[in-house]
Image (tube, grey):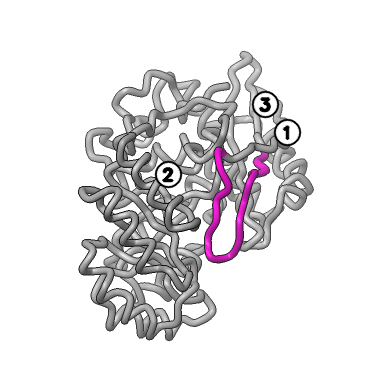
Amino acid sequence: MSLEASFERVSLDLDQPFTISRGTQTAAENLIVRVTDDGGMTGIGGAGPAAHYGETADTVAAVLPDLLDVVEEVGDPHALYEIESRMESVVHDNPAARCAVSIAVHDLAAKRLGVPLYRMWGLDASAVPDSSYTIGLDTTERVHEKAAAAAEAGYPILKIKLGTDRDRELVEAVRDAAPDATLRIDANEAWTPRETVVNSEWLADYGVEFIEQPVPAEDPEGLRFAYERSALPIAADESCVTLSDIPAIADRCDIANLKLMKTGGLLEARRMIATARAHGLEVMLGCMIESNASIAAGAQLAPLLDYADLDGSLLLADDPFTGVDLSGGSIRLGDQQRGGTGAEE
């Protein structure tokens, strides 16, 4: 058997500007990896690098040739552990780059077996959480409009980005527009530990489910302070990047929020989920702003999750890839007819 691997850069416009406490984004650069076997079957993967974690489209493009050389040298898409291990030895950092290759190889392996990836892993498609839909920072009027539109589109869970001097006003606007929705909060490290505790008390009055990464990742004791005193559960995102972070956050949060682009690959993502479970944590899988070249792979992990936040492709003006149907927040793995991750051009 032989494999041919290639990649390309794509710039994806967002449907509307997306703002969090760290800034505004109007487009996302993704890198698409393709791995083709000698029978002409192709696996697809994607990287959505985040500068916050030290990766850009340029850094991913710089290391992908070395990673794809590994795939071609191994030459077997079913040698998943060997490929991921060798990739990490060649490029230790750049997890989004490694993850794009991991997704493409997993996609090809499952396609060759003629089954969706979740079935290759032996997972139960009936046991999946709904995904949240994110309401980015904006004027109060626009936040109300976005929340009303999301509720009308059938999204049962809304994640609200906060970190302003109008946080209560924004939550009120969302609750008014979507009175029946489950609400989650993401402050993206914008609050102090004491602000987190105070905010958690009034957020609980609005029926908020949990707070994601309220304090800076560089303040682990602040995260512990917030966790021990918050009126709501705490999820760790920026504080939970690699496998080794999980034992360190186990007594500082309730939920570990993983992202494929942080993990470096699907095998490592599954290790992190198992490790989080072993430490008594619930697990959420989030995403960057990504196409279905990678979001569809994240959806395959849904049976292993307590919470999902896989709306990255839904924020795009146009996604060049189809994937698992996530409209209305439901992750419809049971409807997946295609083998692999479900991503197709």
Q: Quick check: 20 above or below 85?
A: below
Tell whether position 27 is magenta.
yes
The tag earlier along the polypeptide, 1 or 3, is: 3
The crowd level at tag 3 (other Cα within 10 Å; few <14, some 14-19, many 20+) is many
| Mark 3 or 2, nearer chain start | 3
- Taking the magenta stretch, the answer to whether it contains residue 262 is no
* Label whose residue precedes the other's in the sequence (1 or 2): 1
The number of numbered badges drawn on the structure is 3
The x, y position of residue 35, in whole percent, is 64, 28
Q: Residue at x 31, y 61 (%)?
A: 172
User: Label 3 vs label 2: CA separation?
Assistant: 30 Å
Contact between labelled residues 3 and 1, with CB atoms less than 8 Å apart: no
Q: Nearer the viewer, residue 133 or 304?
A: 133
Magenta stretch, main secondary structure class: strand
The residue tagged with tag 1: helix, strand or loop? strand
Which quarter shows the C terminus?
Answer: top right
Mark seen at residue 8 = 1
Instruction: Identify the magenta region.
Output: 15-31
Circle 3 sits on which residue?
Answer: 3
In x, y percent, where is residue 302? 34, 42
Q: Looking at the rendered structure, which numbered label has been put on residue 310?
A: 2
